[in-house]
């Protein structure tokens, strides 16, 4: 059996298992599975607004998932996309509140990318210089970033005209334009696709990308061949954090149009699952992000129409990730026994 055919069969098996488990969970919710699935797909394809909402929800997942995928390529386990998201959103908000027009948009995007990248570099330096696990550092930095935003919206960025912990609304000149009014689909989705194309080119067609992949495969072999492990970890960490920061920028400039707490909806943590489902491939990140967003939109419709808990989607996503990991473990065992 060819490797391509084997992957297709494995994918079908995972899909069938997921559908079977989903059906059981729906029945446990005292709902008709056929009716539930009908509402699920109606929520996604039933109207233009629902269809576009899939891409709206997929946009931050593409940015953060792409960031995690880049970091994972070098063996740098960035679990800090959530914190980098918040830092990017905070920095972009500070720019958007003070600079208007196209210049404000460009500077907010640049500032958010740089802030997220620098936030990830902290963990990279701790790992390279002190040997401290980047997993621990990035998780701790998540809490710091989230609480920094909490302090900001209660103090120096709080809307002086209100009493709610959030910033003032940005001037409309710094909002990212909508692509299909009156839907919420915005130009951030185009930026996400461009980012995927740039990262794919960087990883597949440049010397930098080659070195990043070599470091990820075998750090000792990379060092013996004159490839700087430290340099490539720093590059991948900065790029990873910058992409996650961009997710925060797009969220505040296109969706919320202000800074507030809980702005990420945990998409920074979901990014780890996206990267795993995509096999750390940039194009796979788009597919995984859109699929996950579609599941969320469809599940929300099921919940509204039939009372089926949308949490079922979270269970199924976890199941899919476990099955993908199990598939990888089985493949490694086959190679070892061959």
Image (cartoon, grey):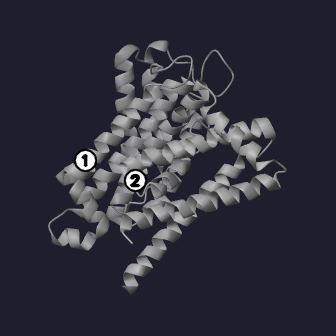
Foreground residue among 329 and 141: 329
User: Please, which residue is most extreme toward the front here?
Assistant: 1
Q: CA distance from mark 2 to mark 1?
A: 13 Å
Foreground residue among 310 and 220: 310
Q: Residue at x 71, y 36 (%)?
A: 301
Q: Residue at x 76, y 52 (%)?
A: 26
Task: Give the x, y percent position of residue 299.
Answer: 68, 42
The residue that disc 2 covers is: 69
Task: Give the x, y percent position of residue 87.
Answer: 47, 39
- Classify residue 252 as left or right of residue 27: left
- Classify residue 206 as left or right of residue 287: left
Task: Give the x, y percent position of residue 311.
Answer: 71, 49
Q: Quadrant of the C terminus?
A: bottom left
Residue 133 appears in the figure = no
Foreground residue among 9 and 131: 9
What is the secondary structure assignment of the residue under circle 1? helix
Q: Quadrant of the N terminus?
A: bottom left
Q: Residue at x 64, y 14 (%)?
A: 161
The residue that disc 1 covers is: 202
What is the secondary structure assignment of the residue under circle 2? helix
Look at the picture and state if 189 lies above or below 205.
above
Q: Residue at x 49, y 14 (%)?
A: 171
Q: Residue 300, located in which quarter of the rendered image?
A: top right
Q: Residue 331, located in which quarter of the rendered image?
A: bottom left
Task: Give the x, y percent position of residue 219.
Answer: 27, 69
């Amino acid at each position: 059996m060819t490797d391509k055919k084997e992957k297709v069969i494995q994918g079908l098996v995972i899909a069938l298992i997921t559908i079977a488990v989903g059906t059981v969970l729906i029945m446990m919710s005292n709902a008709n599975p056929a009716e539930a699935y009908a509402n699920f797909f109606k929520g996604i394809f039933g109207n233009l607004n629902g269809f576009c909402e899939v891409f709206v929800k997929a946009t931050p997942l593409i940015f953060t998932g792409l960031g995690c995928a880049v970091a994972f390529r070098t063996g740098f386990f960035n679990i800090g996309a959530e914190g980098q998201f918040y830092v990017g959103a905070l920095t972009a908000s500070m720019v958007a509140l003070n600079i208007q027009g196209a210049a404000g948009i460009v500077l907010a995007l640049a500032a958010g990318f740089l802030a997220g990248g620098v936030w990830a570099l902290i963990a990279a330096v701790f790992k390279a210089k002190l040997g401290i696990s980047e997993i621990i550092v990035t998780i701790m930095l998540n809490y710091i970033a989230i609480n920094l935003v909490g302090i900001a919206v209660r103090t120096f960025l709080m809307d002086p005209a209100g009493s709610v912990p959030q910033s003032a609304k940005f001037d409309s000149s710094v909002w990212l334009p909508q692509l299909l009014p009156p839907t919420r689909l915005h130009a951030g989705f185009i930026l996400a696709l461009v980012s995927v194309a740039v990262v794919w080119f960087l990883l597949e067609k440049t010397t930098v990308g080659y070195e990043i992949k070599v470091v990820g495969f075998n750090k000792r072999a990379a060092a013996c061949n004159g490839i700087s492990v430290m340099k490539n970890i720093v590059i991948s960490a900065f790029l990873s954090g910058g992409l996650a920061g961009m997710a925060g920028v797009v969220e505040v400039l296109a969706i919320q149009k202000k800074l507030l707490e809980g702005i990420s909806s945990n998409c920074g943590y979901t990014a780890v699952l996206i990267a795993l489902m995509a096999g750390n491939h940039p194009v796979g990140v788009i597919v995984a992000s859109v699929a996950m967003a579609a599941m969320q939109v469809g599940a929300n419709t099921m919940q509204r129409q039939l009372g089926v808990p949308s949490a079922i989607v979270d269970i199924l996503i976890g199941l899919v990730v476990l099955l993908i990991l199990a598939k990888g473990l089985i493949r490694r065992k086959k190679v070892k026994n061959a």
